[in-house]
Amino acid sequence: MMKILFDVLEKIGVIGLICVLIGYLAKQIISMVINKDLEKYKANLQEESHSYRLSFEKQIENFKSELSILSNRQFRLDEKRALVIEELYHNMVNLNTHLINLTALFKEGSSPEAIDEEDQKQANKTAELANKFVEHFDRNKIYFTAGTCKMVEILIQDSKSAFFDYTFSMKYGRSYSPESGRKKHSAAKKVRDDIPKSLNAIEEEFRLLTGVNKIKK
């Protein structure tokens, strides 16, 4: 065995041996450099990955925070609008009930004077409720779309028209006349035929705004 080794060394010579050793050492050095660079690359990659993950998590937290703020703001807006709608609807129904009573064409009383006196009281109360309804609506228009505001404004206009037509003779201190009779009939018709359509449309709009229509039966 030793003879074979010596024969090999003799054949390749010292220079060959040195070349083999240099090749081996070079291979080992290159392998070490590659491994070192690979480890460094892996470390850098892990560091970048960790940094990216932290940045991503921070962005997610910021997004959650902003979303929570927007959600809370929307909740407060919806809550406030629900309260506004509740009071507005209450005022609207009160006004309509008194308009119906005021414009009733057949009324009972001990005398025409007693009926007129009761009519005047009813008219004063209706005017008070109308003012309350309009003032509350004007203060809170910002919570409604232009379309919803238009619907309420039409109701207000029809209610005012009916009120002024019915109280025409009261306002000018005139006794019954064909003109005042015609206006009272016109007011009664508007209260019973036209205004309910506006009320129904507004009620449906309020249901949409408060989410009542989304509640499963």
Image: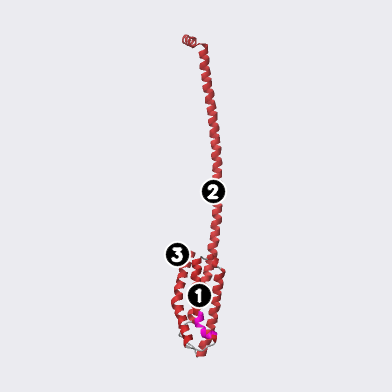
Question: Height in image: 149 above or below 160?
Answer: above
Q: x, y (%) of residue 164? A: 51, 80
Image vertical order of residue 58 relative to residue 204, above or below: above
Residue under the image location 51 percent in, 19 percent down: 23
Q: At label 2, which amino acid type do we have? A: Ile
- Up the image or down, 168 lies above or below 66; here it is below
Q: How is the image coloured?
A: secondary structure
List the single residue furthest toward the front: 179
Who is closer to the viewer here, 178 or 33?
Answer: 178
**Label 3: how many Cα within 10 Å (few below 14, some 14–19, many 20+):** few
Residue bearing mark 1: 157
Q: Residues within 10 Å of mark 1 (few under 14, many from 20)?
A: few
**Magenta residues (range):** 163-171
Q: Write down the residue under mark 2.
A: 60
Question: In terms of depth relative to the viewer, which is nearer, 31 or 135?
Answer: 135
Sequence order check, earlier mark of 2 and 1 = 2
Q: Is residue 125 visible?
A: yes
Residue 125 picture location, percent across and down: 54, 80
Which residue is denoted by mark 3 in the rendering?
213
Amino acid type assigned to the residue bearing label 3 in the image: Asn
Viewer-nearest of discs 2 and 1: 1
Spatial CA distance of label 1 from label 3 is 28 Å
SS at mark 3? Answer: helix
CA separation, marks 2 and 3?
34 Å
> Residue 163 placed where, x, y %?
51, 80
